[in-house]
């Protein structure tokens, strides 16, 4: 069964992780596969983005540790906005330590990420113990984990072997792992969500090695399910208009994919 | 020239990164190669550890994001204690994102890591842009970067190829990178410091995949310059006594290494 030939709704039935089914259902009902990467540095900016763009998105991706004036009120407010506008909160923490440490980083500290983030992500680089550690916190709180398989930055070290090993760890934790941060779908298995950063309507690159692909290329040919847009929206003159353009582009690309699935190799 | 045959003092002259020379000189003068991994969750516990064990160590390694009651006063206090007892502050953040993001995470947010941590670390996994991004913040503040080459956790994904690529990035940024988090020296080049976690007097393992080697094995045969001890000290009945034992074991192993350098393959 090829995931690219199925609707998000159909795929929800294949998921083992509750948060994967929840996100696919939400995307289907809300008709959006757009995630906003809200890389702002003030709490008020983050709240404004969440309130203004919330109706357009399925996921709000945060870097909570770049907010200069963070207080627990911020994350409580985000949880309320996410409930109102029906999107999931994804803290892009990129956990990358041994199991005992990530457990403490995920559950504790000032941010208490496990209390408010529906989704987090992690690198499998430290080995399977990192997923085990995060699962010990996240499973009972009904959270989901996204594994980082393939980054968008130039010269990354994620070889085909690395990506396959990441898939293996996902398969062993399918009740908790919802899918991947990746530039290309890792498999045709419909249960895995592929979330793709480095997407811009016009493609291109930044000065620190970030590279961009278009929404249509990402979704139709590379198997992206969720497109993660940051500066393409937040740096736009009119962020709401930009979000609506990305949403439309993303959704139309998905509909085209369903109507005429790409049958070439995904990678 | 084999780093294992040289004293810390002799090696300081080979360093390109100011913080590498500073740390080697400090280790030589203070006669300690012990780093404390202070994985506690309360500010007061961290301050007590820094004050009590400060005289024994060359580096205090923190996970600032697991402190439940963090305030900027904590890091200001740590800076003062580090000055009094002459050790460096190393925030074990394991940066692992694209250049633009790590810049913001390093300089900004609640923690403002660049303001107080002499040393930080990063995975090269995202590619060279991560080091470029961190250097744009750290170089002008006279900070140092440690690259994570080889973790101590079971089943990690750090292949020989991965480790060599990490060394290549270090070589291109030798004015900023002081060395590696590694289980084995990456090269015989005396300018690189090798900091080794997963060290315990009795060896062993934990329940989440962490594995331990003894100080003597780490220093004499694997080329460790700094041994990073966490639970072996902090979970001891008498942490000061335990720190003194580790310090003695680490320093004697170093003296033996200088007197009779191991000439076998380091890896």
Image (tube, coloured by chain):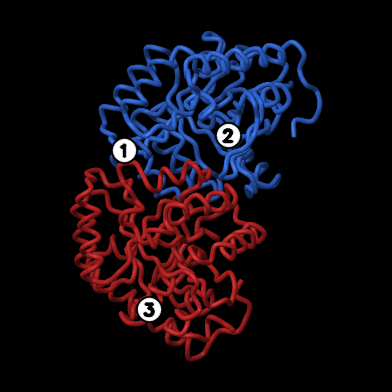
Chain colours: A red, B blue
Asked if badges 3 and 1 are on one and the same chain, I answer: no
Query: Relative to residue B223, is residue B24 depicted above or below?
Result: above
> On the rendered structure, is A26 left or right of B166?
left
Q: CA distance from mark 3 to mark 1?
A: 36 Å
x%, y% of residue A127? 60, 50
Give the residue at x 44% y 16%.
B53
- Of A36 and B256, nearer the camera is B256
Image quadrant in which you'd find residue A2 = bottom right
Image quadrant in which you'd find residue A242 = bottom left
Label 1 environment density (alpha carbons within 10 Å; few <14, some 14–19, many ≥20) = some
> On the rendered structure, is B216 left or right of B13?
right
Work out which quarter of the rendered image holds the C terminus of chain A and state it: bottom right
Residue under pointer 3? A25
Q: CA distance from mark 2 to mark 1?
A: 26 Å
Q: Residue extending furthest right?
A: B264
Work out which quarter of the rendered image holds the N terminus of chain A and state it: bottom right
x%, y% of residue B262? 77, 21
> On the rendered structure, is B180 left or right of A73?
right
Residue under pointer 2? B181
- Of A100 and B151, nearer the camera is A100
**Mark 3 or 2, closer to the camera:** 3
Q: CA distance from mark 3 to mark 2?
A: 43 Å
Residue under pointer 1? B68
x%, y% of residue A248? 33, 80
Residue B221, labelled with which disc?
none
What is the chain letter for disc 2? Answer: B
Give the residue at x 43% y 14%.
B86
Give the residue at x 70% y 28%.
B222
């Amino acid at each position: 069964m090829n995931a690219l030939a199925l609707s998000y709704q159909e795929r929800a039935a294949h998921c083992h992780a509750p948060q994967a089914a929840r996100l696919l259902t939400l995307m289907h009902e809300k008709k959006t596969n757009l995630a906003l990467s809200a890389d702002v540095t003030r709490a008020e900016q983050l709240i404004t983005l969440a309130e203004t763009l919330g109706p357009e998105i399925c996921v709000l991706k945060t870097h909570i540790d770049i907010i200069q004036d963070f207080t627990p009120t911020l994350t409580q407010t985000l949880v309320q906005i996410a409930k109102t506008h029906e999107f999931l909160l994804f803290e892009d923490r990129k956990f990358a330590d041994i199991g005992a440490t990530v457990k403490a980083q995920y559950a504790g500290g000032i941010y208490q990420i496990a209390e408010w983030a529906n989704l987090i992500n992690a690198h499998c680089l430290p080995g399977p113990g990192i997923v085990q550690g995060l699962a010990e916190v996240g499973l009972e709180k009904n959270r989901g984990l996204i594994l980082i398989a393939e980054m968008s930055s130039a010269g990354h070290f994620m070889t085909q072997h690395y990506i396959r090993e990441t898939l293996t760890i996902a398969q062993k934790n399918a009740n908790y792992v919802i899918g991947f941060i990746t530039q290309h779908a890792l498999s045709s298995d419909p249960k895995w969500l592929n979330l793709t950063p480095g997407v811009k309507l016009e493609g291109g690159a930044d000065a620190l090695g970030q590279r961009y692909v278009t929404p249509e290329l990402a979704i139709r040919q590379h198997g992206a399910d969720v497109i993660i847009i940051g500066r393409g929206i937040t740096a736009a003159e009119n962020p709401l208009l930009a979000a609506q353009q990305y949403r439309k582009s993303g959704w139309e690309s998905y509909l085209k994919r369903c109507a005429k699935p790409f049958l070439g190799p995904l990678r």
